[in-house]
Image (cartoon, rainbow, N blue to C red):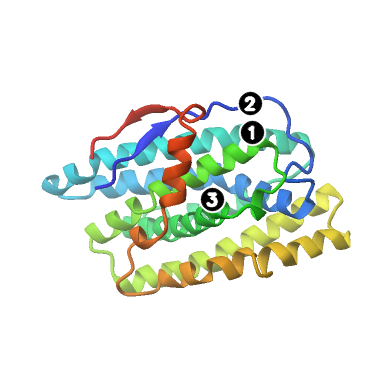
Amino acid sequence: MTQLTVRRLLIDLKTPPARHWCGGDAFRTALFNALSMSFPVGEQFFIDSVRQGVSQLPADRRADFDDEVRGFVGQEATHRHVHAQFNAHLVAQGLVNHWEPRAQRRLKRLEGIDVRAWLGLTAATEHFTAILAEYVLEREAPLAGCEPRLRDLWQWHAAEESEHRSTAFDLYRALGGSEHWRRRLFWMTTLYFTADLARQTVNNLWHDGSWWRPSTWLSAWRHTLGREGFVRCTFASWRAYLRADFHPTQGRADAGVQWLAAHADIAPAVRAAAG
C-alpha cells in the first residue's frame, strides 16, 4: 500500500489574485480557474467513493487499505478546502461556476448505484489529474509567469495528486471491478471531463471579457494542441489507461516527490499514514 502524508499549505490565500494571475495569459488563467471550480465537488465525490469502497471490503482485507484511505481523505479534504478559498476570489471577480451544479446533478443520479461504479469514475478522473500533474510539474510553460504563491498552490496540488493516484484504482480492483467497466467508465469520464473543462473555460473567458481577443485563442492553440500543449504531451499517458496491464504506478512520479521534498517549508506534514 502507498504511504500518504497529509500536509498543510502555508501560502497567502486571503489576498485576491490578479485577474490574469497566470503570467498575464487570459486563456491559461481561465483554464486553471475552471479546474479549480470543479475541485470542491469532485474531491468530495472522491472521498465518498473511497470511504464507501473500503467499508465494503471483507474485514481481513480492509486493514490493508485503512491507513492509505485515511491519507487519501486527508489530502483530498485539504485540496477541497484550499480551492474553495481560491474559488471565492473568482466569484468576487464576477466568474460563474456552472461546472459544480452540473456535476452535482450528475452525481445525484449515482445514488444507490454499485460502489464499484463510483470507484471506477474516481480512478478514471484521478488518472486525468495525475497526467495533468505530470504536465504541470515537468514543464515550465503551463505556469510560466504565474504569481509565485499560486504556482506553489498548483504544484503542491499536482504533487499530491501524483502521490495518491493509485488508491481508488486499487480499491476498484480489490472489490472485483471488471476491466470492461474500467475502460468504459474511463471513456465516459474523458467525454464529460473534457467537455466540462472546455465549457467552463470558455464561460470564464466570456465573463472575463477576453474571449474575443486573438491572443486568447492563439494561447489556447499553443497550450492545448501546440508542440508543448497539453493534448500532445499527455496523449500517450492518457491512452495507457486503456491497456490491460495498466497500473497508475507506471506513471511518472519523480517530479512530485522532488517538489514535496524541496518545499516542506510551505507544505509541512500534518500526519503520515503508516505504510
Whole-Å distance between the Cαs marked 3 and 1? 15 Å
Q: Is residue 113 visible?
A: no
- Judging by the rendered image, the residue that carries numbered circle 2 is 12
Other-residue count near label 3 (Cα within 10 Å), few / some / many at <14 / 14–19 / ≥20: many
Q: Foreground mark, 3 or 2?
A: 3
**From the image, which quarter does the C terminus lie in?**
top left
Q: Amino acid at mark 3?
A: Leu
Q: Earlier in the sequence, mark 3 or mark 1?
A: 3
Name the secondary structure under disc 3.
helix
Q: Position of residue 162 (x, y in %)?
A: 43, 50
- Judging by the rendered image, the residue that carries numbered circle 3 is 137
Name the secondary structure under disc 1.
helix
Residue 193 occupies which quadrant of the picture?
A: bottom right
Q: Earlier in the sequence, mark 1 or mark 2?
A: 2
Whole-Å distance between the Cαs marked 1 and 2? 7 Å
Q: Position of residue 214 (x, y in %)?
A: 87, 63
Other-residue count near label 1 (Cα within 10 Å), few / some / many at <14 / 14–19 / ≥20: some
Q: Are marks 3 and 1 in contact (CB under 8 Å)?
A: no
Q: Amino acid at mark 1?
A: Arg
